[in-house]
Image (spheres, rainbow, N blue to C red):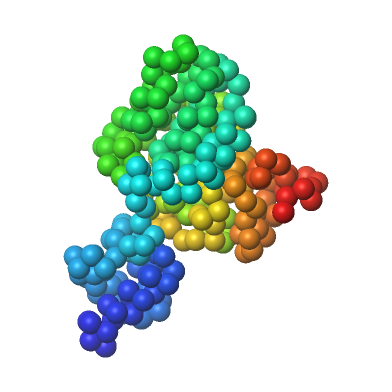
Amino acid sequence: MLAEQRQSLILDMVNQRGAMSITDIQRKLKVARETIRRDILQLADRRAVTRTHGGAVALKASEAVLDERQAINADAKRTIGERAARLVPDRAAVILGGGSTVLAVADALLERRRLSIISNSLVVCGRFAGRNGNRVTMIGGAIQTANSAAVGSDAVAMLARYFADFAFIGAGAISSTGWVMDYTPEEADLYALMVRSAHVSVVVADRTKFNRQGAVRVVDLRTVKYLVTDHRPAPPLAGAIASSPLELIANDKRRTVGNSPVGDALP
């Protein structure tokens, strides 16, 4: 098979699925991993895909910069932020990740008093600093311009020193099998640690993130306490959630799933 034909097939598969690993592509095309790496590099050089560690992401699946993402589905994100913020009392210690939906949570928490905020987001830290007696800790590291947030090994090492009452992270995508996913290993490592660094972990995501594929796994929803969203997920993700202990909060109502009774209040 000519390189042009092979790259065309790779591009079609990546665009169809949103993201693919080198391993998955290798299974489909049955060619050497090094050949696939070269193909992905050439496709990335032509700006046909976004190259990641271990695979490729479709350009349409790559996240927009923070200002642009805040304007996308803004009403849903605002509602999600308000619902998620109800979990948090005054004086709580709260870890907040980067991203537009977590920023909506931050905005809804601004009237709380004496919070201990721990965040890798420049925007989040700026919102809370000097307000209502809050204590703000900025997680340092290499700044990711798309989110105005710090990521990388320095950020992970600093976060490892802290533990909080609540942690809120967003999602680049949530797969049909219940994996919260993102687009870089640096984000994934940091946000997975945030989930492990709190008594109560919360994923906030609007319906556009459901049944989608990202480049890198962050955390399995079965290890998270709450998923706060604007609408109950459709199958097959709905089935993955139903078999987990996760508590779903959507449309101003709660639905406990897994081993607990399931209500019928949600649409």
For the residue pair 218 and 252, the one nearer the viewer reads as 252
How far across and how far down the image is residue 73, in percent? 48, 49
Image quarter of residue 189: top left
Image quarter of residue 8: bottom left
Which quadrant: the C terminus?
bottom right
Name the residue located 35 percent from the left edge and 57 percent from the top edge.
62
For the residue pair 230 and 95, the one nearer the viewer reads as 230
Which quadrant: the N terminus?
bottom left
The residue furthest bottom is: 1
How far across and how far down the image is residue 63, in percent? 36, 52
How far across and how far down the image is residue 185, in percent? 36, 49
Q: In the picture provided, is 219 more to the left or to the right than 30?
A: right
Name the residue located 33 percent from the left edge and 30 percent from the top edge.
122
Q: Is residue 252 above or below residue 133?
A: below
For the residue pair 56 and 64, the one nearer the viewer reads as 64
**Residue 201 seen:** no
**Residue 261 seen:** yes
